[in-house]
């Protein structure tokens, strides 16, 4: 797949068309634009489009909007490309400004300034997948399932995920106020949170009642190496019962999910299928066979919940179907679409949905999420971890 060339053409359309028309080409017919920018072969495809509406809107905004002179041409270009991406009606297909692209890169490196929550967009709402352990958000009372209605009094309705993130971000020590409502109790709360420099933890391990437990928080840059160290700890423990906890884990890199899943699957075993648009051949990602490094094959249990998304669902689906792992908890989030991140000029980027993830057995993660074998709803009013306890009891039968 190479979307770089088509995307560059799209950006050129916006840039050339805006500047060209704005500085004197607006009297040219649409066919002139199509032939000179898109190429004559595409004239029929867009001949019905009415570009005059765009430029009338540009002119009226200039005339009517107070201080319109403060909105730069570059800002307008970025806004136009955002609108182009939004027209595809997919929450994961969007254009990233330089600031938003920098934020994304910071997240994937594992360091950020903010309040410490993982959020996603679903059904037009900005939802909290999970607050990070020990984060300002967790300490302030933000919980998984909260829907963010406002940030500093500004409604998040019609905002992209990146726009919400940008508003939540700020300087360390400053305060942000978010208005949330939880899906379970429907109670609206206004929470003030002091931003801080946050180091995103990768994982932690513990041993409980003869069971080795890996709490895996993400699939970012350091996850593969840290998981390998955790598996070395499992080997040294002499145990053969293992729990992998991906509750509240929002995912990360596909490559990390493949390498971590490979600890439990023989070489060339399918981990996840990638289904493209009709007419394109399906592809599959397979195990690298890291399983050979384990001398004791573990009896596996995976902990999941509504905050387990993307790479977490890939891992859970593969180990459930191919490693005889039992899943405990709640049905996962259902983030089963594939995004390609395409760097663009001026430190911008396009994030485009290009495919859907399927489990090895062909189940669409987007459509159903991953269903646990044992459905358990933890009581948030108590400190008892019923899901983990159920998994330990099952492994110790």
Image (cartoon, rainbow, N blue to C red):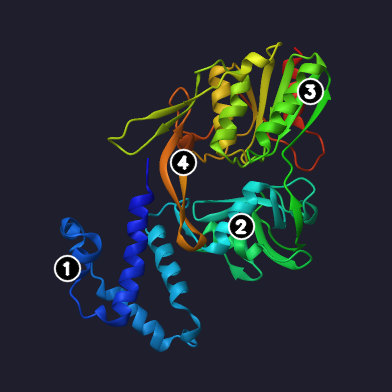
Residue corresponding to mark 1: 31
For residue 311, what is the image quadrant? top right
**Distance (Cα) linking label 4 and label 2:** 20 Å
Residue corresponding to mark 2: 103
Name the foreground residue: 33 vs 178: 33
Mark 4 packing: few (<14 Cα in 10 Å), some, or many (20+)? Answer: many
Q: Do the residues bearing badges 2 and 3 touch, measured as CB atoms within 8 Å? A: no
Report helix, strand or loop for mark 2: helix
Name the foreground residue: 232 vs 318: 232
Residue 233 tag number: 3
x, y percentage for residue 129?
63, 46
**Which callout, 4 or 1, points at the residue further toward the start of the chain?**
1
Q: Do the residues bearing badges 3 and 4 touch, measured as CB atoms within 8 Å? A: no
> Is 102 placed left or right of 11 in the picture?
right
Q: In this view, does 47 lie above or below 107?
A: below
x, y percentage for residue 22?
32, 80
Residue 117 tag number: none
């Amino acid at each position: 797949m190479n979307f770089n060339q088509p995307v560059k053409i799209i950006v050129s359309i916006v840039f050339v068309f805006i500047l060209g028309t704005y500085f004197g080409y607006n009297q040219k017919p649409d066919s002139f634009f199509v032939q000179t920018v898109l190429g004559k072969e595409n004239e029929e495809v867009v001949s019905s489009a009415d570009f005059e509406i765009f430029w009338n809107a540009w002119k009226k905004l200039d005339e009517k909007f107070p201080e319109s002179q403060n909105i730069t041409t570059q800002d307008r270009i970025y806004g136009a490309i955002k609108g182009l991406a939004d027209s595809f009606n997919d929450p994961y297909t969007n254009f990233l400004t330089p600031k938003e692209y920098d934020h994304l890169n910071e997240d994937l490196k594992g360091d950020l300034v903010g309040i410490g929550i993982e959020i996603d967009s679903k059904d037009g709402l900005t939802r909290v997948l999970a607050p990070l352990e020990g984060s300002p958000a967790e300490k302030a009372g933000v919980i998984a399932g909260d829907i963010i209605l406002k940030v500093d009094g500004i409604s998040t309705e019609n905002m992209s995920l990146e726009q919400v993130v940008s508003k939540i971000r700020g300087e360390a020590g400053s305060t942000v106020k978010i208005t949330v409502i939880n899906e379970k109790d429907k109670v609206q709360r206004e929470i003030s949170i002091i931003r801080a420099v946050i180091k995103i933890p990768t994982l932690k391990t513990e041993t409980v009642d003869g069971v080795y437990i890996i709490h895996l928080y993400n699939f970012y840059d350091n996850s593969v190496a840290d998981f390998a160290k955790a598996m070395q700890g499992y080997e040294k423990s002499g145990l053969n019962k293992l729990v992998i906890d991906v509750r509240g884990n929002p995912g990360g890199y596909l490559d990390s999910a493949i390498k971590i899943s490979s600890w439990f699957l023989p070489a060339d075993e399918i981990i996840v299928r990638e289904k493209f648009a009709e007419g394109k051949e399906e592809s599959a990602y397979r195990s690298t066979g890291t399983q050979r490094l384990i001398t004791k094959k573990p009896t596996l249990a995976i902990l999941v919940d509504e905050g387990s998304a993307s790479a977490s669902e890939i891992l859970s689906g593969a180990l459930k179907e191919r490693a005889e792992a039992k899943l405990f908890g709640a049905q996962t989030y259902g983030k089963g679409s594939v995004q390609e991140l395409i760097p663009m000029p001026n430190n911008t980027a396009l994030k485009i949905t290009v495919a859907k993830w399927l489990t090895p057995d062909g189940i669409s993660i987007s459509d159903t999420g991953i269903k646990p074998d044992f459905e358990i709803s933890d009581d948030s009013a108590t400190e008892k971890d019923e899901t983990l306890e159920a998994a330990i009891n099952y492994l110790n039968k």
